[in-house]
Image (cartoon, coloured by chain):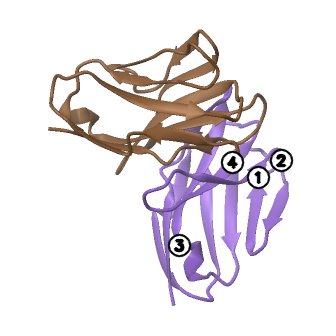
Amino acid sequence: DAEITQSPRHKITETGRQVTLACHQTWNHNNMFWYRQDLGHGLRLIHYSYGVQDTNKGEVSDGYSVSRSNTEDLPLTLESAASSQTSVYFCASSRDGPYGYTFGSGTRLTVV
Amino acid sequence: TQLLEQSPQFLSIQEGENLTVYCNSSSVFSSLQWYRQEPGEGPVLLVTVVTGGEVKKLKRLTFQFGDARKDSSLHITAAQPGDTGLYLCAGPTGYALNFGKGTSLLVTP
């Protein structure tokens, strides 16, 4: 069965370290997205990609980067982790058109 | 960013009651989606509404898209404990979705 997987599920890192969160989908979806979810703010878009070599900034992109070298993967990198980046991160994918997202199970990141 | 306002923010009801949650915006959307999220998991798509005035039913859940395509509602009939979760509405900008902050529903036996 097709799926979208995120790893790790939980991570604790120190302030200033570079961190990469993985997202892998086997749906063959063109579109992939990264969101963070925080109490009081809901889901906020960080970065998204409409295909290989395409990346776009979302609402809260500062301090984050992504790259899309193939259809299946969109890793999210925190360049220099900050305590404000403690959050739950969700990856999602979709096909072109008014179709819903398929979400991963999330990564809970704590920056200490 | 097109804002989506959801109400109420929290709702606690007993099993068997009916409820309605709302999703409102000042912007027109080409479509709206509803998701349910359970603790520790990602949101799961419930429905997409595309046409103004459209009504879709999913068992005990009824979704309506406003005529002007600026708002939507979700009505649950005879709520069950399994309906507990965070209900999110979302509208697109391109293929990227803007999410409301959600309605947190608790259904107690």
The residue lying at 59 percent from left, 40 percent from top is: A4
Which amino acid type corresponds to the residue marked 4 in the rendered image? Gln
Question: Residue beneath label 3, please?
Answer: B84
Which amino acid type corresponds to the residue marked 1 in the rendered image? Gly
Q: In the rendered structure, the residue with mark 1 lies on which chain?
A: B
Contact? badges 2 and 4 (CB < 8 Å): no
Choose top left, top right, bottom left or bottom right for residue B28. Answer: top right
Question: Residue beneath label 2, please?
Answer: B52
Nearer the observer, B77 or A110:
A110
Q: Earlier in the sequence, mark 1 or mark 4?
A: 4
- Mark 2 vs mark 4: in front: 4
Q: Earlier in the sequence, mark 2 or mark 3?
A: 2
| Residue A59 screen position, x and y as percent | 45, 26
Alpha carbon of mark 1 to alpha carbon of mark 3: how far? 25 Å
Alpha carbon of mark 2 to alpha carbon of mark 3: how far? 28 Å
| Residue A81 screen position, x and y as percent | 23, 26
Q: In the rendered structure, the residue with mark 4 lies on which chain?
A: B
Q: Earlier in the sequence, mark 1 or mark 3?
A: 1
Please indicate, yes or no, whether residue A32 appears anywhere in the rendered image.
yes
- What hue represents chain B? purple
Please say if A59 is above or below A54. below
Crowd band around label 1 with a 10 angstrom C-alpha radius: few (<14), some (14–19), many (20+): some
Chain given the colour brown:
A
Which amino acid type corresponds to the residue marked 2 in the rendered image? Gly
The label shown at residue B66 is: 1
Which amino acid type corresponds to the residue marked 3 in the rendered image? Thr
Question: Residue beneath label 4, please?
Answer: B33
Alpha carbon of mark 2 to alpha carbon of mark 1: how far? 6 Å
Please say if B44 is above or below A47. below
Q: Secondary structure at mark 4?
A: strand
Choose top left, top right, bottom left or bottom right for residue B39. Answer: bottom left
